Image (cartoon, rainbow, N blue to C red):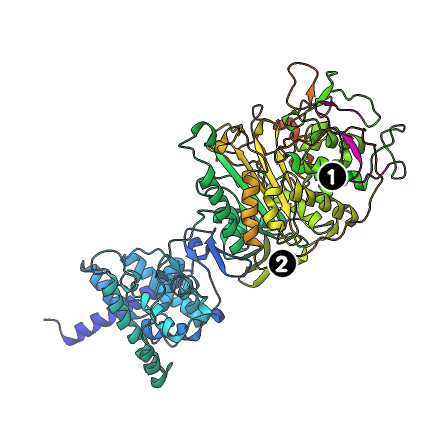
Amino acid sequence: MPSWKQVTGTCLGFFGLLLATAGIGLAMVDIPDPQKTANVQKNVYYWSDNTQMVIAGGGDKNRQIVDIEEIPESMQNAVVAAENATFWDDNGVDPMGIARAAFNMAMGGSTQSGSTITQQYVKNTYLSQEQTLKRKFTELLISVKVGGVESKQTILAGYLNTAYYGRGAYGIEAAARAYYDKPALELDTSESAFLAATLNGPNLYDPAGGQGPGASAKENTERATNRWKFALRRMVEIGKLDQSTRQDILDKGFPTPNPPKPATNKAGQIGYLTDLADNYIVANTTLSRTELDRGGYKIHTTFDKKKMAALTKAVDKVEKANIDPKKRPKTDRYVQFGGASVEPKTGKIKAIYGGSDATVHFTNNADYTGVQVGSTFKPFVLSAAMEYGIRNPDLPPEQTEQQRTIVSPKSIYDGDNKLKVKNYDGTIWHNEKGEEWHQRNDGDRSEGDVDLRTAMQFSTNTPYIQLAMDVGLDKVRQTAEAAGIKKDNLPGWRSPSFALGTSAPSAIRLAGAYATYAASGKQVDPYSVESIEGKDGEVWNHDSVAKVKQGIPADVADNVTDVLRTVVQEGTGTAAKPVDAQWPTAGKTGTTDGNKSAWFAGYTRQLSTAIGMFRVDDQAKNQKFLEMYGTGGQESIHGASFPAEIWTEYMLSAMKGKSPQQFPEPSELGTIVGEPTPTPTPTPTETEQEESPDPTPTTEAPPETPDPDPTTTCRPLDWECRQNENGGNENGGNENGGSGDPGGGQPTTESPPEEGETEGNDNGGSWFGNN
């Protein structure tokens, strides 16, 4: 038998060796960099009323990191009381707990934690979650070192921000919203005590129930209630809560959390909204895509929750009532709708309709799609004629303001069908093949001599294509840009058919341009993000970049509005009369050649909305716009039909509760050009229909549209239409190398698509970003 001296010496030697080993380990170990996953957060998006819209982006964990000042003391005290009462005084480790857990694991028993808050923080932030002796020993050494380097406040905040509380919530901020739908700072003592209880095992402490045996709602509620009472009792014992307050909390009862909500994701319209906001941020702020993807930002958008719901409901209602792919597979398959609603004077995008579901249909139909807008473009022609005037046919093409004649809406133009398109000087216009062009009206109607108001009212093509030639197509393009259409969206402007809407601005841009007229010519670029907050406060605010300019002269804009009011009251846009009956309304229908798209764009003084409809197989590798003859059981689709129905249904809801605002009385403007013939052709009866077919040459097999210039064969959807005179658009897209706000663009393909196709990415989306 060894003597007591031998036993004592052996024990002292063992402990000395243990201390030496620990000392060497402490000297050798460094505090590693935090795990990337511990710092990756979600971005939180908010509606315009500052209620939370969705948590998205960032990593795969629902986490938003907050400072210790944003965590209520009641939550701090509850966690310390329930998890580690000696936290404020210990050195970061519990030797007995570690020894007990290590012994059990070494003997093959169940894995145990035995960890302090500091150790849990170290595990969550610096290490993996594996339960091994090596990881435990590493955790112990790092915890001692962290305890001597970092403040207790930093450690506690780090633990509360990285711990898992159940319901997919990592961190106290996400947990507070998941259980009580409020920010962490608003938690009361009772709620804090419950959330502290969930850290003991969320699957067994969520009153809604967990997974597996023994995790029913009833059993979980019982466990959670007992743990909640325990946390409150421990808060009293450590002096962080007085007994009377505890009793008051107990008397009020267990703070039952809200029922779990389905996981927030990008289904429905949400994905279109978050992508639109993200693209805008990358294109218009100093935040890079990488920084945005790292997460942790609070993004306050312009989107109105009620208007979004109203627009989605309006599309669904009209689509359900009319579109039936099972009944009419040849005509009703692949029907797409897109829409946007913009607030005049501010440019705030209040609502969009991007498609059926962002997780299924990847292209945002409110954004650039390549869909031509048809006769909704005619107001820009009239606007150009009233601002710049028509040219003197006896002078050279480039003329001064004094040499031009400002045109009144009362001016007379020939509205006959198959009219020869002429240059401003009266000579016949020819394309580079020497072909003449005879412009058709919808239904081959002949109107005779009509004034420009009537021609707009019934969407007669021939007066407006000739008016554009007289003004100059460059001036029409300039006017469209001044109203808010991006230059990238105005290809093929040298072709006479440009005046009839062969260009393809997005629903957002079209609504924004019409909003310019609603605001008496004041132009503001549409935008989707109000402000961005990071962990240190606000990092960007739209007020810092907001620009309002007089894009269109006020008297011109008000005269255009007055003409467009006639369209709604007595023309092709009468479907919108229910809105006009309550709020003064102006608008325009649009239909394109081949019945491949239809639009209605209109506005009140307070809100401008554009709705488009088209057909395209969004899953096809090569996407082509399809005809809509027979779609919805109708002979053909016009802007006056389903698009106008959706517009009216939406606007009646979106404008509810708003006082009617009158448009300014238009001033007399311009000279009445032209004289009517003694016997004008009667107005046709089918005034609800209109179309913007391209001019027809005298040859038997004309191309769809005249070429924009001698060097480029340019049909509406051709790749060449997206080029400028030098064979490419400025800087590879727009002025910034991508498409304009409300977002950034994507690179174009290396080679043009086949004729008649839209530029599509691998997911069926547009290569061009938000316009």
Q: Nearer the viewer, mark 1 or mark 2?
A: 1
- The answer to whether residue 151 shows anywhere in this view is no
Q: Within 10 angstroms of label 2, few (less than 14), some, or many (20 or more) residues?
A: some
Please give the name of the residue rendered at 47% of the width and 40% of the height, measured from the top-left corner: 319
In the depicted view, which residue is nearer to us: 443 or 189?
Answer: 443
Q: Quadrant of the N terminus?
A: bottom left
Mark 1 vs 2, N-terminal side: 1
* Residue 457: x %, y % from top left: 69, 38
Residue 129, compared with residue 143, is above or below; it is above
| Three-letter amino acid code of the residue under disc 1 | Arg
In the depicted view, which residue is nearer to us: 646 or 403?
Answer: 646
Magenta span: 405-423
Q: Magenta stretch containing residue 409, yes or no? A: yes
Please give the name of the residue rendered at 31% of the width and 70% of the height, measured from the top-left corner: 94
* Residue 159: x %, y % from top left: 40, 65
In the depicted view, which residue is nearer to us: 751 or 427?
Answer: 427
Contact (CB < 8 A) between labels 1 and 2?
no
Please give the name of the residue rendered at 74% of the width and 39% of the height, measured from the top-left corner: 453
| Three-letter amino acid code of the residue under disc 2 | Asn
Quarter location, residue 408: top right
**Element marked by disc 2:** strand
Give the number of marks.
Answer: 2
* Residue 717: x %, y % from top left: 61, 28
**Element marked by disc 1:** helix
Residue 609, compared with residue 49, is above or below; it is above
Which residue position is annotated with label 2? 541
Which residue position is annotated with label 1? 453
- State left or right for residue 438 relative to residue 315: right
Q: Quadrant of the C terminus?
A: top right
Magenta residues: mostly which secondary structure?
Answer: loop
In the depicted view, which residue is nearer to us: 239 or 276?
Answer: 276
